[in-house]
């Protein structure tokens, strides 16, 4: 008997196939295919444009570092590019402080390869977890990029007594920032960047109180846009867990702390400071989330989510 000789089913319970129940999706129309192709091409063009802008920015910074674009610091600003001060910072940050850090925590550092190609000023943006964030970031950054790195410190506290002033200037290359409405030191960060000095900023504005990252204020993004320098996003993982707010010494047991420097960023054309700040925040949070479980474990993630 051949297949053609087999009679159709006579089962009374058998159902005729329903043509409307065909599970195969309808074939895409020419218009939908064109729309998909256009969307893919647009995304690819955006990605290529951003990479090109990053490349041009890196080339521009390299040229400016040779004195072709940045202003030469004079007067009060000259000390922030002082060679002997940088040598003193190297000893303090990379010898003495590094020895202290290694004795109380287990530090780890990961740096994106493009950070090492920057040859001019930039804004280093990081989450703020503890009192030691500033020197920890400074000692972790490659020396070629971190040699003149400076950060703002409250003028009414760190600069009101000579011994505190000497400490923050020598250890962190710090400059005074105003609190309480004073405008005495307004514009210092912008002038420093234009003089070729990179700046560290904590856009949350204060240390974390729960371990969760807060929203970023747009000042750092506005500064980078205004001067035309890249932003280096950085995430500190484990800093809060090692030294929560209210403690002045890390917890015992040398807890792990990792510093991750991400790929440098530049603002998109016509991107506002608020939009750029949100994008920077997303990048820092992505770096934090990417390394969180590896550094602190899945259990810590559950505790943080329930906080």
Image (cartoon, rainbow, N blue to C red):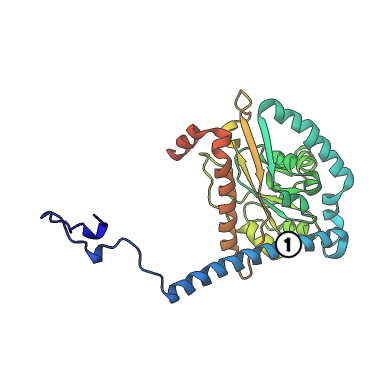
Left or right: where 134 falls relative to 23: right
Which sits in the foreground, 99 or 205?
99
- Name of the residue lying farthest toward the top: 253
Which sits in the foreground, 241 or 118?
118
At numbered mark 1, what does the secondary structure look like: helix, strand or loop?
A: helix
Residue drawn at the location 83% of the way across and 65% of the way down:
69
Q: Is residue 239 above or below residue 47?
A: above
- Name of the residue lying farthest toward the bottom: 31
Q: Quadrant of the N terminus?
A: bottom left
Q: Is residue 110 above or below residue 30?
A: above
Name the residue tied to disc 1: 55
Q: Position of residue 252 (x, y in %)?
A: 61, 23
Quadrant of the image occupied by residue 246: top right
- Name of the residue lying farthest toward the right: 84
Residue drawn at the location 80% of the way across and 55% of the way down:
119
Residue drawn at the location 70% of the way across and 30% of the way down:
101
Does the image show residue 161? Answer: no
Quadrant of the image occupied by residue 168: top right
Residue drawn at the location 34% of the way across and 62% of the way down:
24
Q: Position of residue 28 (x, y in %)?
A: 41, 70
Q: Quadrant of the C terminus?
A: top left
């Amino acid at each position: 008997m051949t297949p053609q000789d087999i009679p159709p089913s006579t089962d009374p319970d058998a159902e005729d196939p329903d043509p409307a129940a065909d599970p195969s999706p309808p074939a895409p129309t020419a218009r939908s295919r064109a729309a998909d192709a256009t969307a893919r091409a647009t995304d690819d063009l955006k990605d290529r444009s951003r990479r090109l802008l990053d490349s041009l920015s890196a080339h521009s910074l390299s040229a400016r570092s040779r004195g072709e674009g940045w202003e030469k610091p004079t007067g009060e600003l000259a000390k922030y590019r002082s060679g002997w001060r940088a040598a003193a910072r190297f000893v303090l940050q990379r010898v003495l402080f590094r020895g202290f850090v290694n004795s109380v925590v287990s530090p780890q550092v990961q740096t994106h390869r493009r950070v090492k190609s920057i040859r001019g000023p930039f804004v280093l943006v990081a989450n703020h977890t503890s009192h030691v964030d500033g020197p920890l970031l400074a000692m972790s950054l490659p020396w070629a990029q971190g040699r003149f790195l400076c950060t703002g410190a409250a003028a009414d506290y760190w600069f009101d007594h000579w011994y505190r002033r000497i400490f923050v200037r020598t250890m962190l290359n710090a400059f005074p920032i105003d609190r309480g409405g004073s405008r005495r030191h307004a514009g210092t960060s912008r002038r420093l960047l234009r003089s070729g000095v990179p700046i560290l900023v904590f856009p949350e504005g204060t240390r974390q109180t729960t371990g969760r990252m807060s929203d970023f204020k747009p000042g750092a993004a506005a500064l980078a846009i205004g001067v035309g320098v890249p932003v280096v996003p950085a995430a500190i993982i484990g800093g809060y867990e090692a030294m929560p707010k209210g403690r002045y010494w890390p917890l015992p047991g040398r807890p792990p702390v990792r510093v991750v420097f991400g790929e440098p960023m530049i603002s998109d054309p016509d991107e506002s400071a608020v939009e750029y700040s949100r994008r920077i925040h997303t990048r820092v949070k992505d770096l934090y989330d990417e390394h969180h479980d590896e550094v602190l474990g899945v259990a810590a993630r559950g505790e943080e989510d329930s906080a």
